Image: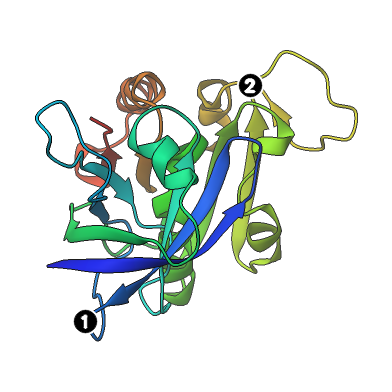
Amino acid sequence: MKFQSIVSESIQVSPKVKLVRLVWAGVEKFPFRAGQWVGVWCDDYLGENNKPIRRAFSIASKPKEKHLELCVARGKGLSAYLQDLKVGEKVWVDGPYGNFWLRPSKTYLFIAGGTGIAPFRSMIHDALQSGANVILLYSMKTPVDFIYRDEFESLEGLELIPTITADHKYPAWQGKQGRVQTLLPKVWKKDFSVYVCGPPMMVAEVEAQLLKLGQPKEQLFIDKWE
């Protein structure tokens, strides 16, 4: 499905990340599964071939919400352009794509790094509604990079394990400190269904570690960023 959307909100949630919310125009609804992604582009942001630059973004909104929510990190290219869009400006969307969605399980272990939290925001709600146990191991650089903190801390049934990777000490921080790889052996169990999303190097290292621990391949799902 391809449609034009309109920016309804742009919310700064950390020094580098904005939540860009889009409402669809010209279509009644946009069905998708929690964990999927969309292609995004703008008519006025062109590449060297004078064609719009398209980029993939995981869907952070829940399937029943009436907007499409994207976690957009400040960077170069289209991400910077999207962060600067004003309410009312138009964005093209196509999709949904991907098979990074929930398979039936009693317990889910979600492992997220940075804006890799985006698909899990949607998946956590689906998993909890199914009655499953959910563990979220969420890595960020510093405490101010913690996206969806209030929401996650309020969810009954979610075991939240946040960790920061910066070496600096933060006296007010009550979570873990260190890479997710150092925490995995204490959290992981063989009967978990495990989902991983984040920066490519982190994902590759976590995937290798999980397989070494004995994670069954059929219960391991990876969302790899291109």
For the point 52% across and 54% down, the residue is 19
- The image quadrant where one finds the C terminus is top left
Q: Secondary structure at mark 2?
A: loop
- The image quadrant where one finds the N terminus is bottom left
Q: Which mark is residue 90?
A: none
Q: Residues within 10 Å of mark 2 (few under 14, many from 20)?
A: some
Q: Residue furthest left?
A: 49
Q: Residue furthest top?
A: 167
Q: Which mark is residue 27?
A: 1
Q: Which of these two is toward me, 171 or 214? A: 171
- The answer to which quarter of the image holds residue 29 is bottom left
Side of 50 relative to 72 (left or right)? left
Q: Residues within 10 Å of mark 1 (few under 14, many from 20)?
A: few
Question: Between disc 1 and disc 2, whose residue precedes?
Answer: 1
Q: Which mark is residue 165?
A: 2
Horizontal and vertical percent position of residue 108: 42, 54
Q: Which of these two is toward me, 217 or 221? A: 221
For the point 21% across and 81% down, the residue is 27
The answer to whether residue 137 of the structure is visible from this angle is yes
Horizontal and vertical percent position of residue 121: 48, 58
Side of 110 relative to 157 (left or right)? left
Horizontal and vertical percent position of residue 45: 27, 41
Amino acid type at mark 2: Thr
- The answer to which quarter of the image holds residue 161 is top right
Q: Secondary structure at mark 1?
A: loop
Amino acid type at mark 1: Val
Horizontal and vertical percent position of residue 9: 53, 64
Q: Which of these two is toward me, 9 or 173? A: 9
